[in-house]
Image (cartoon, grey):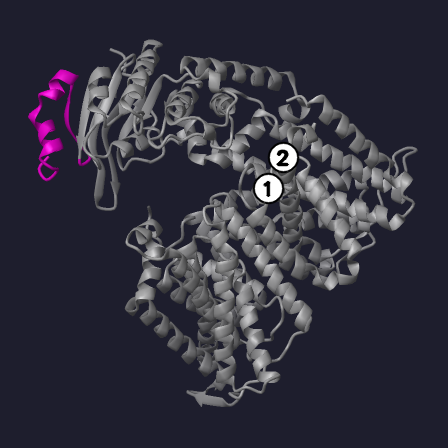
Amino acid sequence: MTLFLQQFVNGIALGSVYSLVALGLTLVYGVLKVPNFAHGALYMAGAYVSYVMLTSFGASYIVAMAVSVVVLAVLGGSMEWLVFRRLEGKTPVHSMIAALGLLFFMEGTADVIWGPTFRQVPTPFDGVVTLLGVNITEQRILVIVAAVVTMVGLYLLLKRTLVGMSIEAMAQDREGALLVGIDTRRVALLTFAISGALAAVAGSLIAPLLLVFPNMGELIILKAFVIVILGGMGSVPGAILGGYLLALAETMAGTYVSFAFSELIAFGLLVLVLVIRPTGLFQKGV
Amino acid sequence: MRLPPARGVALSLLLLTAILFPLLVDNPYLVSVVITAYVTAIAVYGLDVMLGYTGELSLAQGGFFGIGGYSAGILMATYEVSFWIALPAAVVMTAALGYVIGLAALRTRGDYFAIFTLAVGVMIVIIIERWEGVTGGTDGLIGIPPPSSIGPLRFDSLTAQYYLVLFFLVLTIYVVWSLVNSLVGRTFVAVRNSEELARAVGIDAGKTHQLSFVISAALAGLGGALYAVFLGYIGPAMGGVQMTFMMLVYLMIGGVASLAGPLVGTLLVTGLMQFLQAFAEYQMMALGPILVVVIIFFPKGLAGLAKLLPERWRR
Amino acid sequence: MSAPLLRVERLGMHFGGLKAVDDVDLDVPEGEITAVIGPNGAGKSTFFNVVSGFCTPTTGRVALNGVDVTGLAPHRIARLGVARTFQTTKLFPEAEVLDNVIIGRRQHTKSNVLDATLRTKRLRTEAAECRERARQALEFAGVLHLEALPVGSIPQEARKRVAIALALVAEPQLLLLDEPAAGINEEETSGLTALIRKVVQSGIAVCLVEHKMRMVMDLSDRIVVLNQGKKIAEGTPEEIRGDPTVIDAYLGGSSHA
């Protein structure tokens, strides 16, 4: 039972990060209708910015994360401004290829600056809390709590602010949004900035638990795609729920079956979805 | 469908240059660079069949390249099968796998198809890395012998290997050319232009996609197999997503849906990369933005630019 | 009596709670023009999509020459002799006019990859035949002079004619026209009306959805009126003109059909 609870907590912590990454991806998809393959690179960049702030500038963890969020929001926004905006009206294939170009640019840049070495990120939250016989590192607690806070913040942003409502309106009906006077370009820019910020939060939170390296975003982005396809492209609740579910399934499979099997879960789910229902499991039929 | 005479002459000259190249250039390093470009170009033609003519972005092309390479490599190095059996076997194996993967992947189109094939590409690398007993894991597979001789024809010299690879490249270009200029190729393009209309005029869009995907995979398998045999070695990176990315760069720079595009793009970029080898670590950092710029400003690549030249320049 | 060319029985197409097509019967006899009319949202386009195989109906059946084709894929239905055009004139935008029409003949050809790479006699004969047929279809539609132009560069009316040529080149038994006269002027419409009449005279049955009443009244042998997915009237143009239910549906809103 203790093992189960232990793994459950670990799964929730991992799920928090999956959800945050999937959220950024799904928001951008909702607005742009293109899968942003470079999103994993934003997550990687977010982790590196925190790493640099912590190790080179001696910033506190919270400050490091805040800087990372700002930097990545700018980076995300400039992606839209410099690249995707210029591909408006072209086929989705154009945007997808551009996204791949951005992905390899960012990975290549990280590789040039920091090299392919795996880096350990220090955290002040290295204590351990014991609860019901389960040992939880403070960092994991931070991950879980910070993710929930971020999600609540995002929810309030989407539901309570004009900007957020425009994002949702545009995700549902781009032309309609244009007709009611929404500045779709500004909304697209903001959505990318938010997605960058979410990736920064995710990357900064996970960095102390895993290692930081240039390709760290490649596997998680695939998982985020699986989550987003399962939950329905563009769906916010789907991304959150899917993130936690996939992480729990992986953690449990890794504990009770084998590690290799846990890695196959995401891919197996993807095949299953495609075979059963290519448009996504929780999406309404058209 | 027949070539205009001027283009025929130009083509013959090009072919002659390709044939004379290893005789005129007494630089084994340069010859091996061109061989690498040729085998990669074969796979890039495959990518173009799917992306340029059928309109779907397959991100598993690097994975298929790897499967072709490993199939040939394992058959030849581990089981000592002759090249002349291993090569067709590798192509058939890759095509068959492409068919099976296509059954699932082609239930989707566009972005979902790209995501799914990306996942396939990543899974292929993971499997290659994990299946150590067969593939040699992350170390790769060494000791793949050169092709055995047929009668008096020996393939252990660089020049002979050059001609062998050139033969398969020319064959590839011929097959792609005759396909795209036939009713079969028109069917691909019809499906790319409007799947709905294609179906309304009686075209089985599913079968068309499947066919294109299998051809695309087979060409990747051919390129990969030749690559492994020529290098005598194959590692997981050759089947990786980065390989797919490189192929995309070659294709987009050369120009999609054009006959010369894949070859020109591959030769040009591989050549430049060798020339600028001192800056090799900046390769990805540079190619990423180049791809973005090409997509935004020259979506048809060099082939598209060539078409903008005045008519008389082309003839 | 033999079965009619197209017979639609109790056809229903529901999207969730919405009944886009609800219990509709319709026959299209050989050699006639049947029009399907109705106010916006009456279910006409959905009806066409079901008949041509793009949607699988929720209830009912579709039969061609007495053979059940319900739920067959669009390309199968096309190969059984049903051609269609689309409301927003669909063509292959990147190709030339002639190339556009050639592809409509593909369903009658057998050339495969091997024929293409070996450039067999079959491929060459079929390619030449497709080309010839395509030119004939363009001539029939009165747009042969545009054969070498890119589709993107020709006017709207010509595009509609090319779309009809593309449908005809397959030599269908039944032609479904989805608002053929949308977006063209009076004079062009009468030109198109003449073309459609010529199509029927050549032995092809036509079923059309159209908003332009004069064209419908001019052309049709029979008219079927849909409102909110239901068939509310059927008859000759004269009968429909005087039918109070129809007038009510068009004028009195759609609250009580």
Q: Image check: A116 left or right of A225?
A: right
Viewer can see residue B125: yes
Element under disc 1? loop
Vertical placement of B293 versus C256: above or below? below
Task: Please state which amino acid type lies under the numbered disc 2.
Answer: Lys
For label 1, the residue is: B300
Q: Assess disc 2: are there few (<14), some (14-19) or many (≥20) residues with their C-alpha within 10 Å of its C-alpha.
A: few
Labelled pair 1, 2 in contact (Cβ < 8 Å): yes
Viewer can see residue B155: no
Q: Earlier in the sequence, mark 1 or mark 2?
A: 1
Q: Which residues are magenta?
A: C228-257
Vertical placement of C104 versus A211: above or below? above
For label 2, the residue is: B307
Vertical placement of A91 versus A18: above or below? above
Q: Is residue C249 covered in magenta?
A: yes
The disc numbered 1 marks a residue on which chain?
B
Q: Position of residue B254 (x, y in %)?
A: 66, 43
Gap in Å between the C-alphas at discs 1 and 2? 10 Å
Q: Assess disc 1: are there few (<14), some (14-19) or many (≥20) residues with their C-alpha within 10 Å of its C-alpha.
A: many
Q: Quadrant of the C terminus of chain C?
A: top left
Q: Position of residue C94 (x, y in %)?
A: 50, 32
Q: Position of residue C38 (x, y in %)?
A: 19, 30
Q: Position of residue A259 (x, y in %)?
A: 57, 68
Q: Quadrant of the N terminus of chain C?
A: top left
